[in-house]
Image (cartoon, rainbow, N blue to C red):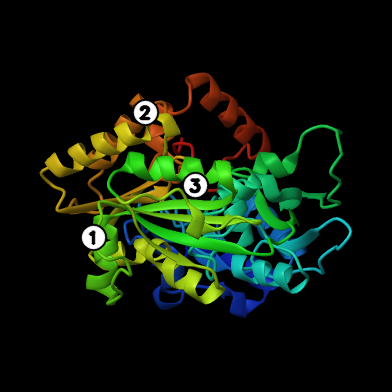
Amino acid sequence: MSTTPTPAASVLLESLRGIVGPTHVLVGDDLVAPYVTDWTRRYSGPCVAVVRPASTLEVSSVLAACSAAGQPVLVQGGNTGLVGGSVPASSGKAPVILSTRRLSSIGAVDQLTGQVTAGAGALLSAVQDAASAAGWVYGVDLAARDSATIGGTVATNAGGVNVIAYGMTRAQVVGIEAVLADGTVILHLNGLLKDNTGFDFGSLLCGSEGTLGVITAVRLRLHHPHARTSLAMVGCATYGDALALMSASARRSLLIAAEMVDAIGIELMDSVLGIPSPLASSWPVVAFIEVADGGDASGLPLNDSHDAVVAFDAGEQARLWQFRERQTEVYGAKGICHKLDVSVPLSRMEEVLADLGSLLRDAPTVEFYGLFGHIADGNIHVEFIGPAADDVEVDHQVLEVISRYSGSISAEHGVGRMKVDSLHLTRSAAEIAAMKAIKDALDPAGLLNQGILFPTA
């Protein structure tokens, strides 16, 4: 939905058309519809227009014009987030949405350093393909690879299935280009591994959710590919069993990924998509263990209580991985789904999962729920259906459980709008004040991504 432009907004829109071209300033409900509602369908709000710059210079000019007009700006990449951080709020002053999708260039891979520079709008899958074509691997992988942008994954410090092997997105960033709220360009893309000359703007902007500046390009670290990996899909009796299997696998081989899905998620694959489990029977928990460099998933420390299928070639591995990667899709098919992305200490994961199961089972508004996630790094995805889209009571109860176990209310997707009021459960008042001070220094008028990460003043 778009707002009816005021006279002042009309003047600004004409200025923006002069910067990016009239076809790249979108106004009208039909044109802005894909940009104003998030993937979960829980968050939506009006905008003044969607502006699609194609260069850093155009981004700078757009931000300078909006800053001079006192116009809030919302930065958006692939709009695949789950916490309302990529779409406007339903109330307050409508923003101009700045889409980074046209900033999609990918440079040549530097074979000496194993690095590549990508525009913020480049798709994650495109960067993966460019790295692979040059004989390298980009270390971040997630199910939304064909729609998530590099700028968005950096702004949210995305994780994915390979964190145990390569680290979060922040570990891949060796240089960055960004534009501040007033149009000032910060450029530091040389990719030096040793550069102790003050603040690391890449690390600062990574995870800042677009509140400090608009990322326009990123210098990324690549990795040498593994000659061979194998993947086991294993039925387990308990979460503790799955954790023990992951731990034993890590001691025997190079662990690339360790994931889990509960029985509900596996059944949904069949009932929603018509894809039955290859396991011989139903299990409370199904683990996915991928190992590399001489490791063999068929040699995992399994026993008579396990039920396993092992895949060696890429096609068979992709067939097994879909049972984990399509979980968000199958839950979304059941209705408006509340999706909470949290992390807990591995030593407490079994207790946390038991408490969450009890909470969701007893919650009167919850009709359907399930759990899946990354058992190697303590990241749990909590999915439930029943409460209205704007009913956050159970959401807060889940986050309070996580806080009691010294966990984080956000493992991958950020705080966005959804978790602003719960940030204190993970961060101290002093930490929040320090973060806000940085925000105020770089965006003193508070025009970028209002209401995201920090409450709207």
Please state which of residues 93 and 391 is positioned toward the viewer in this rendering.
Answer: 391
Q: Is residue 112 left or right of residue 125?
A: right
Q: Amino acid at mark 3?
A: Glu
How many numbered marks are there?
3
> Which SS class for mark 1?
loop
Q: Position of residue 88 (x, y in %)?
A: 43, 55
CB atoms at circles 1 and 2 under 8 Å apart? no
Answer with mark 2 or mark 3, whichever residue precedes in sequence: 2
The residue shown at (44%, 51%) is: 93
Q: CA distance from mark 3 to mark 1?
A: 29 Å
Q: Residue furthest bottom?
A: 23
Residue under label 2? 403
Q: Is residue 32 visible?
A: no
Give the class, few, some or many, for how many residues have Cα within 10 Å of label 2's Cα (few <14, many ≥20). Answer: some
> Who comes first in sequence, dot 3 or dot 1?
1
Give how far apart the Cα atoms at labels 1 and 2 are.
32 Å
Tag 3 residue: 412
Residue pointed to by mark 1: 282
Label 2 sits on a secondary structure element that is helix
The furthest residue to the front: 304
Taking depth in this image into account, of 255 and 379 the one nearest to the observer is: 255
Q: Say which amino acid is labelled 1.
A: Ser
Q: Residue at x 66, y 44 (%)?
A: 205
* Distance between the alpha carbons at the discs numbered 2 and 3: 16 Å
x and y percentages locating residue 409 in the rendered image:
41, 37
